[in-house]
Amino acid sequence: MSTPIPQPPTVPFLGNTRDLDRDVPIQSFILLAKTYGEIYQLDLLGGRKMICVNSHALANEISDDKRFKKSFAPALYQVRNLVGDGLFTASGDDLYWGIAHRILMPAFGTMSVRGMLDDMKDICGQLLLKWERFGPDAIIDPAADFTRVALDTIAYCTMSYRLNSFYTETQQPFIKSMVDFLKECFVRSKRPHLVQALMHSATVKYENDQQIMRDVASSIIDDRKQNPIDKKDLLDLMLNAKDPKTGQGLSEENIGYNLLTFLIAGHETSSGMMTFTVYFLLKNPEKMRKLRDEIDEVLGGRPVEVGDFDKLPYLVAVMRESLRLGPTASSRSAAPIEDTTLGGKYFVKAGNSITIQTYLMHRDPKVWGEDAEEFRPERMMDGKFEALPPNAWQPFGFGARACIGRPFAWQEVMLVLTSILQKFDLSLADPSYTLQISQALTIKPKNLTIHAKLRTSGP
Ligand code: MNH
């Protein structure tokens, strides 16, 4: 006998759509989990159901490529309007996922990423200069500056293209369009078709935002075609490499999709991670001191090099803990390949999307204990990380469809954090700040502001 999956009361026509906050849906997911526990379902528009799981036990069961395959929450499905069958949004059955995956994997291996360190330093240096020149009284918006770093880093390291975000006063049009586009994807996925049809100006803007991003992609591709370079970067691979298995290259259309995929997937998550980490460190000054002591001890004042990354265990623990409490990709979805039963009692039909709320799973007291809400990097080191139950820490997803950019993001964030802490004393601009979350496709701290003062006591 199967047990029905708990569900909040529905209203006619709208189902459970009103249970989801428009701007910050994760707030609703947190509240719903408090009421309904490890699993619940919602009726969305167009007859779709959303099943959410919140516990490690159920998430672990779904982390099985033989029983489940990646699926798309409604908002992510909308993102396909822009990036089609690019790597992130391709369905497992899309021929192009396999071709692009095999062509692009080598570009994101650890060795290849190590070769990008100097280019990453170029961009990171622009951030350091800006904060130094702004001086100790300036109010810095770290989410905005980390977005500049991350976006410029991905464009420069993988496409040898300078977006020069630090040289524009306001946000890059690309970033503005991207944020608005992702927001609209969310809102759209919850709007009835009839209402959507009437929202003419929203649709015009939605399409205009996509065009702005497509234009950036085209100019990067055209620029490369006109000015070929020797470097075998990601863009070169996309334009020229052949899939070893099928012998096929990527189509023009798919190159465009993937280029935008990398610009979007390659920066939102990393910039959010840097912002969360700075937030957690500022709220936990003794952890900040401990981290800085480690950096000073290992590096003195010299720039970090590739070989140093293995010598900074506390930094690694801080990054893991920050991604546990602030997993910037806060959920992922998968669907059973055949009809199945979850947790021995909840029946789920084949193809019915299940959303793992990583944010909640990362706080499951069965795994993390009663102090799960506390930022405690110590739980991520000295063998404790390796001893965690399988799939308890999953900020980069799972299996074949896990994050391809993990080594890239890891190195980038290590570089930025070590560089900032070597150079500045950070403080909250508003000491009473408490965490609020903003959400587009990913989550990050909202309205966090800081000061950065050059260190007086050097290493
Ligand atoms: Mn990334 C997939 C999280 C940085 C490019 N990424 C995923 C998934 C998660 C994720 C979770 C799986 C999503 C799903 O199952 O639906 N990614 C992150 C986080 C960071 C990150 C937390 C940084 C911190 N990602 C990056 C960077 C790049 C990148 C940097 C590019 C350089 N990610 C991708 C791509 C995919 C992906 C591409 C899709 C991979 C695939 O399906 O084959």
Image: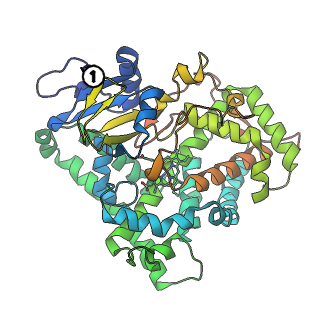
Total number of numbered labels?
Answer: 1
> Picture coordinates of residue 183 (x, y %)?
35, 43
The answer to whether any part of residue 398 appears in the image is yes
Q: Nearer the viewer, residue 238 or 380?
A: 380
| Lateral position of residue 42 relative to residue 428, left or right | left
- The amino acid pointed to by label 1 is Ile
Residue in view at x 40 percent, y 30 percent: 26
Residue drawn at x 72%, y 35% is: 383
Residue extending farthest to the front is 1
In the rendered view of the protein, which quadrant contains the N terminus?
top left
Vertical order, 45 against 368 (above or below): below
Answer with the quarter of the image where residue 5 lies.
top left
Residue for point 47% across, 45% down:
398
**Residue 142, image quadrant:** top right
**In terms of image quadrants, where is residue 85?**
bottom left
Applied colour scheme: rainbow
Q: Residues within 10 Å of mark 1 (few under 14, many from 20)?
A: some
Identify the residue position indicated by label 1 in the image.
5
Whether residue 248 sits left or right of residue 301 in the image: it is: left
Residue 358 image point, x, y percent: 46, 34
Up-down relation of residue 173 to residue 15 (above or below): below
Q: In the rendered image, is residue 214 in sight?
A: no
Q: Is residue 115 above or below residue 229?
A: above
Task: Name the foreground residue: 377 vs 276.
Answer: 377
